[in-house]
Amino acid sequence: MADNILAGELRKPVQMLAEQKVGGQKSVHDDKEAARLGIQAGPIEGPTHFQQFVPLLAEIWGNDWFERGCLSVHFKNMVFEGEEVRAFVERPEAGSNRARCWAEKADGTLVLEAEATLGPDDGVTLLEKRMAALKPFGELIVLEDVTIGIKSKNDEPVIMGPDQHMGDLYPFTLNEKLAVITEPHEWYTGDSPWGDRVIPLEMVCVLGNYANENAGFPIKRPCIGLFADLQMRMVDGPLMVDTKYILRREIVALSQTKRVENYWVKTQVFDETGTTVKAEILLNHGIWKASYPEYPKELLPS
């Protein structure tokens, strides 16, 4: 392997969303629902893979990574429980604030391609480029009533305690995640340079989606979704355990493929006063067309 490539250890991430419910129904992470869509089993949730990059990027940028780092990820292939995954980072040239990243299964299958950047002057990210290049989305069915620019109706106060159940979307606690996390760190369980405990990067997505069903976006249900792209950016980080935050969301793009309709949501995480942005999440939600019972059969791929 080239000297400028940092490689993590092979890890076996744990599937923790088998009991996830979206709009009162099971999700793609349930084995039966996955099978109904032609998937071999309920996949590992995408944010889990972010964690394997943290020690590699901290080696490059130190504590600045926890405060101002951004990881922008396009998912390529699903991972199932029992499979091993390794993270890779191409070390940037001296003075650069941008690094190419990717993850592979043990057999070399590409799991995701990504780009890490260090703010505040990190320019356009991988997903921002992908979003800017989207083609006209045409007729949408499940997302027919969703328009770009829609914002969540109200500020959403959130907090993550160590033993707090994070709701139907994430039916586990922080401590339960820490018991199986792929990359543990003393700052997740004890004092850190920022005072109290740091919320792990993969759990930032959990915090950001804690009250997501209350955002009021007019998505037709029942339907089953997946994460197609995900970006997590620290603006004034890290985010901390037992600390109050406010979420605000906006639909920033719409798109579709033959099998999936997509809505892109930007979630900003503010401090409890609602005046200072602490972090941002850009998430491309994909909705399987075939999972919506009233989807016109003639519009489904054969």
Image: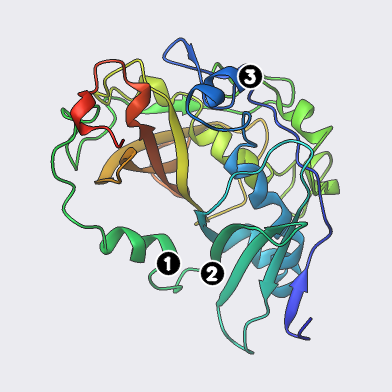
Report which residue position mark 1 lands on.
125
- N-terminal of the two: label 1 or label 3? 1
Report which residue position mark 3 lands on.
171
- Residue contact at pointers 1 and 2, CB within 8 angstroms: yes
Does residue 148 lie above or below 62 as drawn?
above
- Residue contact at pointers 2 and 3, CB within 8 angstroms: no
Quarter placement of the C terminus: top left
* Residue displayed at 29% across by 40% down: 250
Amino acid type, mark 2: Thr
**In the displayed structure image, the side of residue 238 where residue 302 appears, left or right:** left
> Residue placed farthest to the bottom in the image?
94
* Mark number, residue 117: 2
**In the displayed structure image, the side of residue 6 where residue 287 appears, left or right:** left
Separation of disc 2 and disc 3 at Cα? 31 Å
* Residue displayed at 44% across by 74% down: 121
> Residue placed farthest to the top in the image?
24
- Residue contact at pointers 1 and 3, CB within 8 angstroms: no
- N-terminal of the two: label 2 or label 3? 2
For label 1, the SS is: loop
**In the displayed structure image, the side of residue 84 where residue 112 appears, left or right:** left
The front one of 93 and 221 is 221
Q: Determine crowd level at label 1: few under 14, some 14-19, many 20+ residues with C-alpha closer than 10 A.
A: some
